[in-house]
Amino acid sequence: MSGTALAQFFSGPFLVWFKIGFIVVIFLSALFFYSRRRSATDGCKSRFKILAFTALVFHVFYPLIETFGQYFIWREDSFSQLFLPPHQSLGYFFSYVWLHFWLNALIVIGIGVLFYLLLLAFNKYNQRFFEEGETELGFLCAFLVGWPQFVIFVVSVFVLVVVFSVFRRIFLKEIYTTLGPLFLIAAAIAFIWGMDLILLLNLGVLRI
């Protein structure tokens, strides 16, 4: 494939739809595994860990592809060639891809790991909020929603906890609400409407 063809490929919609498709497939897989649990102790913990690791690898692989794509796009355009050696140092290109591709990926990975550690600590302190595997499910959802949609994800979880707890207490006479289903609902909200809500709440400064 020629450089021009590669540049056209990377500048097209394929990468965007590839990322969306990956997130949808992983999310539906998590939803399927969670809905097929045989009991509260059969939480598909190992499967959620595999899905979370797959999402982590994707967050490294995707900006790598974007980096190569950006190079080919710039190289094949007479104007943007000025941003590459010998007109500019290679450091300029690396600074650009770091800010536009890699920084967001590292933030997502860092926040996902931190969120998982917080869930583990919370589960150790009070296990009534989690069934088996739900901490790993939360870990996976944090990876899937990305940044800054993670903010909407966390807020949605808290709101859903309040709403579902009130509903279960009044209508079902049940006190406790586990977080697994709420993670999935909040992840769907953040994925579908996350950026719209970020802008609506004037949190656009969080975008990278």
Image (cartoon, helix red, strand yellow):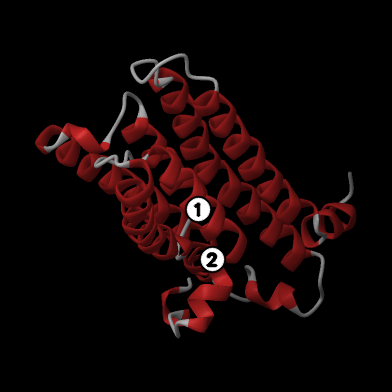
In depth, the one of 35 and 123 nearer the eye is: 35
Which of the 4 quarters of the picture holds residue 181? top left
Mark on residue 75? none
* x 18%, y 32%: residue: 127
Give the residue furthest to the left. Answer: 125
**Residue 4 vertical position relative to residue 31 in the rendered view, above or below:** below
Q: Going by the image, does 105 lie left or right of 36?
A: left
**Real-space Cα separation, disc 2 to disc 1, in angstroms:** 8 Å
Give the residue furthest to the bottom. Answer: 202
Q: SS of the residue at dot 2?
A: helix
* x 73%, y 68%: residue: 74
User: x, y percentage for residue 121?
Assistant: 15, 39
User: x, y percentage for residue 79?
Assistant: 77, 80
- Mark 2: amino acid: Gly
**Mark 2–mark 1 CB contact (< 8 Å):** yes
| Residue with the mark numbered 1 | 145
User: x, y percentage for residue 9?
Assistant: 84, 54
| Residue with the mark numbered 2 | 194
In depth, the one of 110 and 65 nearer the eye is: 110
* x 45%, y 33%: residue: 52
